[in-house]
Image: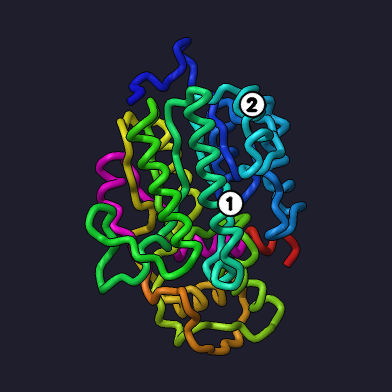
Amino acid sequence: MNRNWHSGNGQRPTILVTGAAGFIGSHLVERLVGEGRRVVCVDNFDPYYDEEVKRANIAPTLGSGLATLVEADIRDRQALAAAFATSGPEVVVHLAARPGVRHSLEDPLPYLDINVWGTFNVLDLAREFGAAKVVFGSTSSVYGLLEDGPAREDATPCRPLSPYGASKVAAEALCSSFAATADMDVVALRFFTVYGPRQRPDMAIHRFARFILADRELPIYGDGSARRDFTYVADIVDGIVAAIDASLLGYHVFNLGQGRPVPLSQVVDLLEEALGRKARRQFHPPPAGEPPLTWADISKAEASLGYRPRTPVEEGVRAFARWLLDQGW
């Protein structure tokens, strides 16, 4: 595998980021530009949620002189190849995906098309244009049902409960195959319940907060005891940057989480406190495809990447609430 992925002139490598205008992607680009790195931002501004939100996410960094935007769909090989050809990235961070467990149960085909075929295009073009490393954004949804302990990369079987989770398992398999056959190192990062400023509006903490502020009944699926390993976006970005910079040969998989699952009911309590409003909780049966527990064993990422999540959920929820209120809610 390629051991010399750093630029030959001693400068940091050019990094191509797919899904750069999204929630995690825009935070990553902001961090990389803040560190003086050159970034090529690829996004197709998919209408899964408001395009203008995503354009606002990425706009501040595009004026830096270090970030350029290429509007391209990862399924469009010709358009994506043009982005690779003009930028010659040494590192690719592949975050573009169709998200959402529940939506994938209703309409699974786009998940296979975008998350599997699109990932193949990214990997194959990275190989064709000589990128030395690909960092792939995977998900805790690959694991499915856990027993009562944390998920471990090398021990917990991947038995996803949804087409979304299955599409990411398939994408990870592609990552493994390219790492085995191309002169390219690949790192798959399994993200656990990421939240924070710019969070997608369909995700739990964002959705809960808007229901509370609008004094609407807040739907909770189950009795509120389901536990999630809520991970603040800045901690996830720390892990991605560490994976970019780490000297890792071949194929590696890491969990990126907080390492501390929290009941949904506790998160609602924290939102009530941060927003100064009471929630009108309405309980519904648990939906298909949603496990009662997500929990990351992060010891491997700690040992290999120096990953140390710094933001407890109490602090992170307050930071999210401040951001949401600053948006005019």
Closer to us: mark 2 or mark 1? 1
Sequence order check, earlier mark of 2 and 1: 2
Label 1 belongs to which residue? 114
Circle on res. 192: none
Q: Amino acid at mark 2?
A: Leu
In front of the other: 188 or 315? 188
Magenta stretch: give its range.
294-322
- For the C terminus, give its image quadrant: bottom right
The answer to which quarter of the image holds residue 100 is: bottom right
Judged from this view, the residue extending furthest toward the left is 155
In this rendering, the count of numbered labels is 2
In front of the other: 114 or 57? 114
* 159 displayed left or right of 24: left
Q: Check if residue 308 falls in the magenta segment.
A: yes
Residue at 54% in and 56% down: 112
Residue at 44% in and 58% down: 231
Q: Is residue 315 visible?
A: no
Label 2 belongs to which residue? 66
In the image, residue 204 above or below residue 97? below
Residue 111, position in %: x, y? 56, 58
Mark 2, other Cα within 10 Å: few <14 / some 14–19 / many ≥20:
some
2 and 1 marks in contact (CB < 8 Å): no
Residue 325, position in %: x, y? 68, 64
